[in-house]
Amino acid sequence: MNKPVRHIAVFTGILVLSLLVRATWVQFVRGDELSNHEKNRRVAIASFSQPRGDIIVGGRPVTGSVETGGDLKYKRTFTDGKMYAPVTGFFSQGYGSSYLEGVNNKLLSGTDDRLFFQRTADMFTGKKARGGDVVTTIDPKAQKAAYEGLGDRKGAVVALDPRTGKILALASTPSYDPSTIAGNSKQDKAAWDALQKDPDKPMNNRALRETYPPGSTFKIVTAAAALENGLYSDINAPTDSPDPWTMPGTVTRLPNQNPLAPCKNASLDVAMQNSCNTVYGKASSDLGRDKMRAMAEKFGFNQEPFTPVRASASTFPKDINKSQTAMAGIGQGSLTATPLQVAMMTAAIANDGKLMKPYMVEELRDPDLKTVEKHKPEVMSEAVSPGIAKKVQQMMEDTATKGTGKAALIDGVTVGGKTGTAERGANQKNLAWFISYAKTDEGSPVAVAVMIDPDDSVPDDEISGGKLAGPIAKKVMEAVLGK
């Protein structure tokens, strides 16, 4: 080979090698970056080129797909969008996705690796690409009772099956319709901007992502801690609880909500019925922060549950003194909880002390309705022994029949309940809480937590868990029980 030809061959080889290196770099090193780039229109076109799989509630889809006539061929639709938004989340041509729509995007869009053989078979049969379905645990009747019970008030409801951890209802109000932001039109942008500016924050998931002081609902955990650690053993015996009681290291007396309630040295049972702060605050202080925190963590505090949507962690504080521990023991101070967490601690008591991991997806299935993945109930912790759980159950059931929890009573059904009125900072209304469970011969099929965040139209003397939240809890339990 003469010299000029050799130079041309070497130069050509270098060019080919450069092209190979460049192609490899683009395809494998920068592939994900380029695929997900905001200006890569092809990815968006592919994402909306076919109908999407559905999210199923009670055997029926609460989502759908509709043709748009544009290059983004399909957009998402939602049935009863406001009611189910805390469950489904949104799927938008312009704003991405959230909650079950986001977590299960690959399955719903049909690109999940577990659908590879399905996609291959469809290629040979000529079928259009299809997405799989997400089958939820939500009970449509319970969800409707929760959502309609909240009405136009700000609040949240979570209902669980204590035996398995299934989330039966997950409501948050005010809510929004994900259909209004599913496209990328001017109307969708206007709807999105309005939601972002809304002072009531309808896109916030108050059931999973917002934390609040749980108030006296937390007394069931304090009662469990007192019994578990041997501070008291008989729920009907007098306690060492003066009234008034001055918190340690302070000159501040811990008040009882009802000054006429028989709280002085009251038994744990009577104190639960009358929601005596002095009894449970002193018990918490006597136990100390470490024992109280250890018990709270057995019920799920200081963890981030996955449902499979991530929930915010509920917090039992670490560095607190005895008086602050007293406040934590009655659900105040720096103690915070999501409505999901409050439902979890209620469910653990109802399930004889066993806390099941909460979950919202029963199964994932392919376009031919074959199961791709099925959830198996998991034990999250043994919060307390069955014996202690039954003692707390007795106190909650006495509270429902004799005390502040009468609002949740259902004819012919054993019900346990507990109210909570949680104080917040200056210029903020108190929160109204209610927790309850129902029992049958087969255990407890439902435990409920209801939180109402009242606006200025509600007089202060009307804010109580029994008045505002209790009737909602009852309706949700009746829906699950088929009453």
Image (tube, helix red, strand yellow):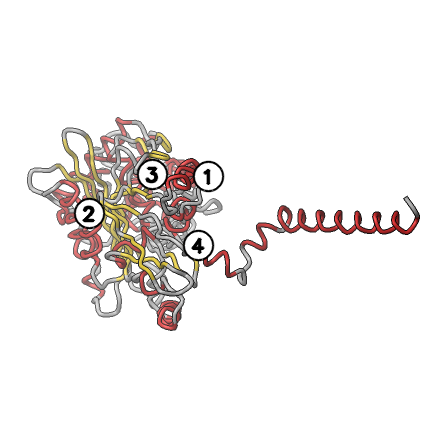
**Spatial separation of the CA atoms under disc 1 and disc 3:** 13 Å
Compare marks 3 and 4 and give the one earlier in the sequence: 4
Residue nearest the observer in this picture, 436 or 421: 436
Q: Amino acid at mark 3?
A: Arg
Q: Residue at x 43, y 58 (%)?
A: 96
User: Under tag 3, what secondary structure?
Assistant: strand
Residue 243 visible in the snapshot: no
- Give the class, few, some or many, for how many residues have Cα within 10 Å of label 1's Cα (few <14, many ≥20): few
User: Under tag 2, what secondary structure?
Assistant: helix
- Give the class, few, some or many, for how many residues have Cα within 10 Å of label 4's Cα (few <14, many ≥20): many
**Spatial separation of the CA atoms under disc 2 and disc 3:** 24 Å
Residue receiving disc 4: 47
Residue nearest the observer in this picture, 17 or 404: 17
Compare marks 1 and 3 and give the one earlier in the sequence: 1
**Spatial separation of the CA atoms under disc 2 and disc 4:** 33 Å
Residue nearest the observer in this picture, 409 or 292: 409
Q: Quadrant of the N terminus?
A: top right
Residue receiving disc 2: 142
Residue 131 point in image, percent of width and height: 37, 46
Compare marks 2 and 1 and give the one earlier in the sequence: 1
Q: Amino acid at mark 4?
A: Ser
**Spatial separation of the CA atoms under disc 3 and disc 4:** 20 Å
Compare marks 2 and 4 and give the one earlier in the sequence: 4
Compare marks 2 and 3 and give the one earlier in the sequence: 2
Residue receiving disc 3: 365
**Spatial separation of the CA atoms under disc 4 and disc 1:** 16 Å
- Give the class, few, some or many, for how many residues have Cα within 10 Å of label 3's Cα (few <14, many ≥20): many
Point out which mark residue 113 bears. 1
Compare marks 4 and 1 and give the one earlier in the sequence: 4
Q: Are marks 1 and 3 in contact (CB under 8 Å)?
A: no
Q: Quadrant of the C terminus?
A: top left
Residue 157 point in image, percent of width and height: 26, 51
